[in-house]
Image (spheres, rainbow, N blue to C red):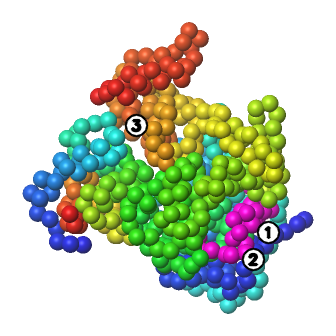
Amino acid sequence: MSQAPAPETVDALLPEVAALIVEALNLEMAPEEIAPDAPLFGEGLGLDSIDVLEIALVISKQYGFQLRSDNADNVRIFASLRALTAYIASQRTK
Amino acid sequence: MNALPLISGLDLDGTFAWLPTGPRRVRDFLADARALAERLPAGGALLNLCHDRYRFAVGFAAGLLAGKVSLQPASQSAETLRRIGDDFPDVVCLCDGDFDTQDLPRCDFPDLSAADPGQVADIPRISSDRVAAILFTSGSTGLPQPHRKTWGRLVANGRAEAAALGLDRTPHVLVGTVPVQHSFGFESTFLLALHGRCAFWAGKPFYPQDIAAALDAVPRPRLLVTTPFHLSTLLASGIELPAIDQLLSATAPLSSTLAAEAEARSGAPLDEIYGSTESGQLAHRRTTAGAEWTLLPGIRLEQDADRTWACGGHVEGRVPLSDRIELLPDQRFLLHGRHTDLINIAGKRTSLAYLNHQIAAVPGVVDAAFFLPDDEAPDGITRLTAFVVAPTLDSRRLLAALRQRIDPLFLPRPAIFVDALPRNSTGKLPRSGLQALYAQKVQHGGR
């Protein structure tokens, strides 16, 4: 994995990724309602595997890299909006 | 009593599966299955929760050798596990991950490296009338319905599918994006290996890049077993595809546009399978060649009034179908949509009756109804809406309770809280009323 991005880089990117998720999944909520540190699955936003594929697709289009499930960090990547955003910041090619 | 081999069409040194470490021969597989059979706890039922297709296969075969039936429920929710525990008190869960089996006893997939393939001298035979697997659907009554599959019918299904797709003449390596426990994956990635001369990739690739890597890891010819949703994400990702020699899709209708794009991008023919958990696989078609389906060898369709029944071949008994069907000459037919309140999201089936039963049972819910909007996007996933009368609950608590009872795919998105449902004077809830409520609350911005 690449170098960890600076916290302020992640904070700055959070609203954009939140908006991407809400739009991709057609969620009935405003992007700022997604708590950055709440889990995206189960008790939090309650996403499922279909959602992950939808999110992965828009991430690949928007940020120019592909997700892989043999990545050991996979559970951590989708642990929260902040974790996902940090991963995007570290992997993006555009 | 008639007995059929565990594997046909391959000899002991034939390749049965591909793991990241390389090929597994039939004899390796049989040695693993025998070793596992000796270690499984006593009991008549096995809930095989292995994610890895090869470990599932070893578990299934070990269960057959040890006299256990394979239970394959449609979901793995806490409610489903509780019900299985009630109906099969001696069930054991076979796990290869950290899945929470609740109160059910579990057996973690053991290290079988000591199994000796050199000791394997023959392929075991299994009585053809033995119930080898029970697949579950959620019936229209709202309760899970078991569908018992005898060993003889499973063997016949694998052989019929291989013959219809030409795989018995040209065996392929199967790469599946679908879980092996559910009917399509069970038939098209597992039975096709046992009785269709194919070998399978042990993984279940998820992201587009995983699918490409899995295809790259196995020799040609390769068959990708997938769904319209996975296929459309794969193509939309724009990644470079390794060579694919054949494509197979099922679980939801595939648009001819997506089928044509998939064939153009891969250069491979794409076949669709029509079937159900109740009946097994019934027919196939090359989607780009037209709307007509061709029955698999031995299958018959019979009609009375507007109902259609499947029988013959590997079908257990006479199975009513939930689709409206127009019979054509020469073993062909057309599909004209569904009859009932059965719904299918991403290949998982349930019924509105079942979901309504589950949501009504949540403490605090006064009245509730699920609603499936008309399809908006072909090959996409349409989500359910639920209208809920529950003055003491909020969305978060409702969803937490529902998550205990139903598969996450069927969770309402969104759940709309209302003061009352539009029931008519007889207490019925016509779809038109829900449609109007949906238009008012969701389509026109009910935020």
Q: Which residue is mark 2?
A: B9
Q: For the residue carrying disc 2, how many other residues have a C-alpha within 10 Å: few (<14), some (14-19), or many (20+)?
A: some
Q: Report the quarter where the C terminus of chain A lies.
A: bottom left
Whether the residues at callouts 1 and 2 have beta carbons within 8 Å, the answer is no
Q: Between marks 3 and 2, how big is the CA–CA gap? A: 47 Å
Q: Would you say residue B441 is visible in this rendering?
A: yes
Q: Are the residues under badges 3 and 2 in a single subunit?
A: yes
Left or right: B345, with A63 as reference point: right
* Front one among B27 and B232: B232
Name the residue at the top extreme: B425
Stretch of the chain drawn in magenta: B147-174
Q: Are the residues under badges 1 and 2 in a single subunit?
A: yes
Q: Chain of mark 2?
A: B
Q: Is residue A8 magenta?
A: no
Left or right: A12, with A82 as reference point: left
Residue appearing at x 24%, y 37% in the figure: A30
